Amino acid sequence: MQQKKRIVVALGGNAILSNDASAKAQQQALKQTAQHLIKLINAETQVIISHGNGPQVGNLLLQQQAADSKENPAMPLDTCVAMTQGSIGFWLQNALEKEIQNANLEQEVATIITQVIVDGNDEAFKNPSKPIGPFLTHEQAQALEQATGAVYKEDAGRGWRKVVPSPKPISIKEKYSINTLVNNNVLTICAGGGGIPVEQHSGQGVEAVIDKDFASEKLAELLDADLLVILTGVEKIALNFGKEDEQWLDQVTVSELEQYIEEKHFAPGSMLPKVEAAIQYVKAKPKCKAIITSLEMLGDIDKGTVGTTVIS
Ligand code: ADP
Ligand code: MG
């Protein structure tokens, strides 16, 4: 029997949420996402899906804070990440089941609550950088900083926000469960929102956010995937992005990309982590490639003519 092609697909924020944060609108967006994803699903492939949760976890934190009381206390960040893995997982699972049925395929879909192991001594813990939750006034931020010890920073002139560390993923706790599901023809959704960060020694959840691009890369490595696809809001990556001499990249090697990183072509926090994740994956699996592209291009991914392909 021919070996199936294992593909990890990381979904960007635009696959789930445009500007309407209602459950209905997000389910509608995921319905369209599922209509693209189904193009990858057939008897020759094993697809594993991960996704972001930035806007969803931000909104959930706001809801938690608005209703916070002794009887109904606000949930901490790790629990909120788990809650969004559940809600987004449900929506996507439900949408994919419909498409699978329409395509006359036989496959179950499952979502795994995923814990991602981080090092408590990761340098990121000394420099919290990822803004989360609501915008506050300076006074509110100072009061909370004193009361809780959390760190607050000014965010691009828009107000003060809590910042949390963004440590690198070391491993994924549920890797055997995920592998078992995938081997048994279950379309698996996991590592949502970059996973729930847990400290490697204590096993406890920590106040941090793991970049979903790095978590997806780790997933692809641990599952020995043949291809990593990172789907985002642009069809390709560009040099001089948004400038007059913008140049879209079709195929690029690791060393070329490393040069472009030096030249600061990729914005930190948006395109840079995708590029770094692609590099890391291809370095770990030199015979494989990573593709960065948009959801709409997914159907043509096998032709090698869409997106930016990263090779070793
Ligand atoms: P996601 O939710 O998929 O992680 P992000 O907004 O974090 O999406 O990152 C993707 C965005 O990065 C693109 O939509 C684009 O606006 C921006 N970007 C920054 N630098 C580049 C670049 N060099 N080439 C292409 N897009 C870039
Ligand atoms: Mg992003």
Image (spheres, rainbow, N blue to C red):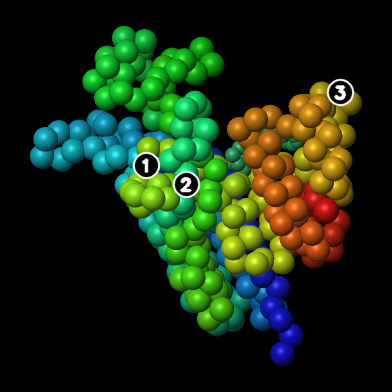
**Ligand 1 contact, mark 3 (Cβ < 8 Å):** no
Q: Nearer the viewer, mark 3 or mark 1?
A: 1
Q: Position of residue 22 (x, y in %)?
A: 40, 44
Between discs 2 and 1, the one toward the N terminus: 2
In the image, 145 versus 308, the foreground residue is: 145
For the point 47% across and 27% down, the residue is: 126
What residue type is disc 3 on?
A: Glu
Say which residue label 3 marks: 244
Mark 3 lies on a secondary structure that is: loop
**Ligand 2 contact, mark 2 (Cβ < 8 Å):** no
In the image, 33 versus 203, the foreground residue is: 203
Mark 2 lies on a secondary structure that is: strand
In the image, 279 versus 101, the foreground residue is: 279
What residue type is disc 1 on?
A: Val
Q: Residues within 10 Å of mark 3 (few under 14, many from 20)?
A: few
Cα gap from disc 2 to disc 3, whole angstroms:
41 Å
Q: Which mark is residue 206?
A: 1
Q: Position of residue 264 (x, y in %)?
A: 76, 27
Cα gap from disc 2 to disc 1, whole angstroms:
9 Å
In the image, 162 versus 123, the foreground residue is: 123
Between discs 3 and 1, the one toward the N terminus: 1
Q: Is residue 107 left or right of residue 60?
A: right
What residue type is disc 2 on?
A: Val
Q: Nearer the viewer, mark 2 or mark 3?
A: 2
Say which residue label 2 marks: 118
Between discs 2 and 3, the one toward the N terminus: 2
